[in-house]
Amino acid sequence: MIRYVLAVVLTIALLAISIPAIDAAATMNSERQVDASLAAIDDEATSLIENEEVTPDGHPDPRRVVEVTLPRDTLTNAEVDRFELVPYESGGYTHARYVLEDGTTREAVLDERIVWNDPEGNETTELGGAGDHRLALVLVADEDGTSVIVARRV
């Protein structure tokens, strides 16, 4: 009988010790997944600017479709509470930021300026909810004729 009690106590102790490690691994796994999505956005936006030109009216605009994966809350993943791409008016870059459910905040800088849905605006691209989100990055001209990358849901 003492062996069974000792085995149960030892199992509970091992579980208690391992839970922080599991949580840390879940956070790292989610960061890896979202960072991969950010890298894909950055690569496709750079590819648009470097390899395409704004098309005349009546012709399809150059675009790239990117899949952004925001993990669900599981034993091996921490859920993303907030994901946003903030364009800077004065610079040609975008500030990417996401927050995990445990409060972990990560930030990165994307090389190109990406605005939400309107080339004349300066709105932040925000994605919410776990799962896969498809974004179209479209190269258009603003009123000054400057090339702008516009993000839209697909």
Image: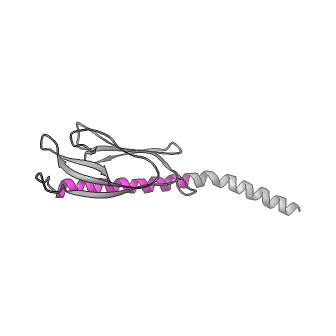
Q: Where is residue 139 in the image (x, y as percent from the top left)?
A: 20, 51
Residue 96 percent across, percent down from the top left: 35, 45
The residue lying at 42 percent from left, 53 percent from top is: 34
Furthest-top residue in this view? 90
Q: In this view, does 81 lie above or below 29?
A: above
At x 70%, y 57%, the residue is: 14
The vertical placement of 140 against 6, above or below, is above
Q: In which quarter of the image is residue 106?
A: top left
* Of 51 and 107, the residue lying toward us: 51
Q: In which quarter of the image is the N terminus?
A: bottom right
Which quadrant is the C terminus positioned in?
bottom left
Asked whether 142 falls inside the magenta stretch, the response is no
Q: Does residue 118 appear in the picture of this structure? A: yes
Compared across the picture, whether 42 is left or right of 71 comes to left
Is residue 111 something that shows in the picture?
Answer: no
Left or right, 82 with respect to 2, comes to: left
Taking the magenta stretch, the answer to whether it contains residue 38 is yes
Determine whether, in the image, residue 140 is placed left or right of residue 122: left
Question: Residue at coordinates 29% horizontally, 58% vertically from top-left?
Answer: 65
Q: What stretch is highlighted in magenta?
A: 24-51
Which residue of the protein is positioned furthest toward the left in this rendering?
Answer: 56
Pick the residue in front: 86 or 137: 137
Q: Which quadrant holds residue 59?
A: bottom left
Residue at image point 64% right, 55% down: 18
Q: Where is residue 20 in the image (x, y as percent from the top left)?
A: 61, 51
71 displayed left or right of 60: right
**Most foreground residue, 8 or 130:** 130
Mostly what secondary structure, the magenta segment?
Answer: helix
